[in-house]
Image: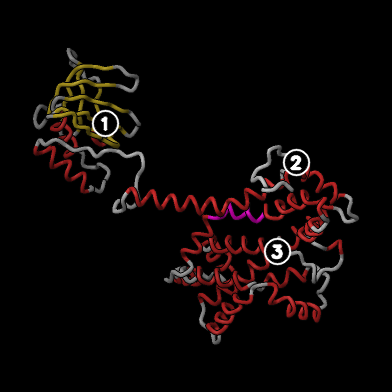
Amino acid sequence: MSEINTVKSNGTLKLINGKKFRGELVAGETGAAFYVKGKQEPFAEWHYARMNRMDNIRRGGTSSQITVILKDDTRYVFELAQGLKLYSHMDKNWVDKPVRQKTRGDILHEQAERLGEKIQVPKKHLITRRHPNRSIGGDIIIYLVLFLFAVAMAFPLFFLIGSSLKPLDELFRFPPPVWPSHPTMDNFSDLFVTMGQSWVPFSRYLLNTVLITAIGTFGHLVVAGMAAFVLAKYEFPGGRLFFALATTFLMFASGVVTDIPNYLILSRLGLVDTYWALILPAFAAPIGLFLMKQFMEGLPTALIEAATIDGASRIRIFWSIVMPNVKPAWLTMIIFSVQGLWNNPAGTIIYSEAKKPLVYALQQIRMGGVARTGQAAAANVITVAVPILIFIFSQSRILETMASSGIKE
């Protein structure tokens, strides 16, 4: 290595295995080499083109620790007396180094090093605050209020699970205990025994519910998704009026309001006492159309135009481009649809016992009198378990949909 335009510094080389060597690091215009004390040949040598990363930690004064990492993951750690000068020399001649955007902290750090000032290292806090303009007392109050709301919301579910595990003597104790003193699974076993004594097996009720929920939810997804796609991305006469009517129908989503009109329509169609009496009305639920349209309006129209230019059909655009990009919206819609269909007893439109859903059978057990109080508590847990589990696993998607439903392109 030429002696011209080189920078030298005495120091120590530390390898990954922990071994240390005292010597001298010499950096030139094309590369650097470390010579162990008393040796003429370099112990470690590299060209700047082989370097992948270089870090510098100032030790005080002009001494610093320099870490050199090559592209083959070879690592050298130097403790040098003139580390700052040597680091600056290598950094200046390392022409193909990765571009890194400097922050204001980096600029201030370099200025302090040039002036020889002491660098102030910020203290690390255990808790990183999102709103530094708010006092710690304000944070405590907010978290306390949120905790109280969380307890108030979780208490009914906790009490429901506790009731399903109580023996009969604790179920009728006053004041009622929140959690049983002697938890038992007898209520669940008695519930399945009672369901097994019915002339319609428990598995048939469960199959009916799963079939109605699955087909109704899939149909709702397809119908609401297609209608929302057309309303959000295409202009046609009456489109705005149709969506205004759909949002108005949200006010009449309660089953009490629509029971009689639904029964009259289904009776004219000859669908009473069939699975379709529950499935077809689920297809036209307005909540899915509203959520999907609001979310699809945030999609860039350029995506659809580009796919059209490439020759994709509207069906292909809908399934391959639109639906994957509105996944949070249709996951939210699935949750609402499953909750509505799973908890629908269908007692007014399905008469055959073999076609009734699980919720109807569980309701009959609840009406069995005082002796079945424990079984009724277990039935309540089974009824709410599926919708709650689906919501827990998908709640982040629901929040994302609600936050994005009002955003326009």
Q: Is residue 270 above or below residue 96?
A: below
Q: Secondary structure at mark 1?
A: strand
What's the residue at 23%, 48% (across, down)?
A: 103
Q: Is residue 252 above or below residue 359?
A: below
Of the residues under marks 2 and 1, which one precedes in the sequence? 1
Residue 49 visible: yes
Q: Is residue 317 above or below residue 121?
A: below
Which quadrant of the rendered structure holds the C terminus? bottom left
What's the residue at 52%, 52% (across, down)?
A: 150
Query: To which quarter of the image does residue 8 belong?
Result: top left
Residue to which mark 2 is pinned = 185
- The magenta segment is 386-395
Q: CA distance from mark 2 to mark 1?
A: 64 Å
Residue 207 visible: no
Q: Is residue 189 above or below residue 295?
A: above
Q: Amino acid at mark 2?
A: Met
Q: Identify the disc placed on residue 341.
A: 3
Q: CA distance from mark 1 to mark 3?
A: 63 Å
Q: Whole-percent x and y of residue 336?
A: 62, 63
Residue to which mark 1 is pinned = 68
Q: Whole-percent x and y of residue 28?
A: 15, 31
Q: Amino acid at mark 1?
A: Val
Q: Residues within 10 Å of mark 2 (few under 14, many from 20)?
A: few
